[in-house]
Each structure stands twice: as C-alpha cells, then as structure tokens.
Image: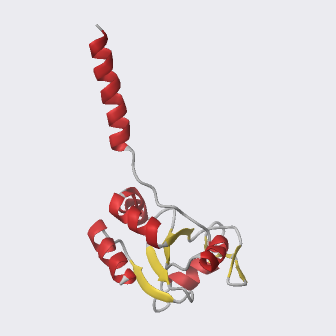
C-alpha cells in the first residue's frame, strides 16, 4: 500500500526539480562599481520596458536557459534596467533620473544614454560594457538563445 505514495512523492519531487529554472545573478549600477574593483568583468545590461513583448519573451526563455545563465553568472555582471524606471540611479559619479515624456510616460536618462543607436532606442536593448565602462557590444532587438550564446562567447574571446 505504501508503494503508490512513494511513486507519487518521487514524481512530485522529480517534477519540481526538473522544472526548476536557472536564474541569472543580478546586480545594480551602484553595486557594479564596487564589484569591478574586486573583480573586473564585462557588464551585461538588459534594457527593457514593461510593455515590450520581445523583452518578456527574452525573460521567459533566453534568460532562463541554463547555458546562458551559466555563462552570464560566471563571466559577467548582469543588470536589468527598466527604461521606465522612476528612481534615481547613480553611476560613474552621475545621477540619472526619470524624464517624463507625457502625463504618465517617460524614459530613464540612463536607459536613453545606453540604449540609443543613431538617436533611436528600441527594446530589448542589449549592451555589454568593458572594464572601462565603454560599450563593447550593442544590439536593439530580440536575440534567441543560440544568437545570444554566440554573442556572449564572442565578447569573452
């Protein structure tokens, strides 16, 4: 009689473990400056907005992929930046603020500064900063798992 309970327990535990997804370790702009003094790594910045379908797709699949998570966690500092962020962000001795564009809309100065390519920003915006905080990679569009893996490996080489 105990056997069915063990099978159910095993299936539940295996199912939970099997569906547990990997997570990218995140930091903030304020913390990354301190971290870089301890260990220099490229900084991967994911600039997104709450209404961006492609951003949500990257969050749901690409940034849950175990290979991508492993590479990001081992070799990069990862920062998520909501382009509509309302709080002030201090980075490189400058305070960046939210800039209203309408009654209930706006963009954060830091998202604008980092996300622009030829005066335009689209989401998701992916940036990699080198140890001197210079942009070494920029891309404004969805990347699938295979494409992002290629980018990460190229940046590391």
Which of the image's four quarters has the C terminus? bottom left
Marks counted in the figure total: 0
Query: Which sits in the foreground, 103 or 117?
Result: 117
Is residue 124 in view?
yes
Q: Give the percent coordinates (x, y) of residue 98.
A: 67, 74
Q: Residue furthest top?
A: 1
Q: Give the percent coordinates (x, y) of residue 153.
A: 33, 77
Query: Which sits in the foreground, 144 or 131?
Result: 131
**x 51%, y 66%: residue:** 49
**x 32%, y 27%: residue:** 10
Q: Give the percent coordinates (x, y) of residue 30.
A: 67, 73
Q: Which quarter of the figure has residue 65?
A: bottom left
Q: Which quarter of the figure has residue 97?
A: bottom right
Q: Give the percent coordinates (x, y) of residue 40.
A: 55, 80
Q: Residue furthest bottom?
A: 118
Q: Residue furthest front?
A: 38
**On screen, 122 above or below 104?**
below
135 relative to 71 in the view: left or right: right
Is residue 122 in view?
no
Which of the image's four quarters has the N terminus? top left
18 relative to 126 in the view: left or right: left
**x 66%, y 68%: residue:** 103
**On screen, 7 above or below 109?**
above
54 relative to 26 in the view: left or right: left
């Amino acid at each position: 009689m105990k056997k069915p309970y063990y099978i159910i327990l095993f299936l539940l535990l295996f199912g939970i473990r099997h569906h547990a997804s990997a997570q990218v370790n995140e930091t903030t702009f304020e913390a990354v400056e301190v971290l870089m003094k301890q260990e220099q790594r490229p900084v991967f910045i994911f600039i997104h907005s709450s209404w961006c379908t492609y951003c949500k797709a990257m969050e749901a699949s690409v940034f849950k992929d175990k290979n991508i998570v492993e590479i990001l966690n081992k070799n990069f500092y990862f920062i998520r930046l909501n382009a509509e962020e309302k709080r002030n962000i201090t980075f490189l001795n400058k305070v960046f603020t939210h800039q209203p564009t309408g009654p209930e809309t706006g963009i954060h100065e830091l998202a604008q500064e980092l996300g622009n390519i030829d005066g335009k920003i689209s989401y998701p915006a992916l940036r990699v900063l080198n140890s001197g905080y210079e942009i070494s990679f920029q891309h404004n569009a969805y990347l699938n798992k295979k494409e992002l893996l290629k980018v990460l490996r190229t940046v590391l080489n």
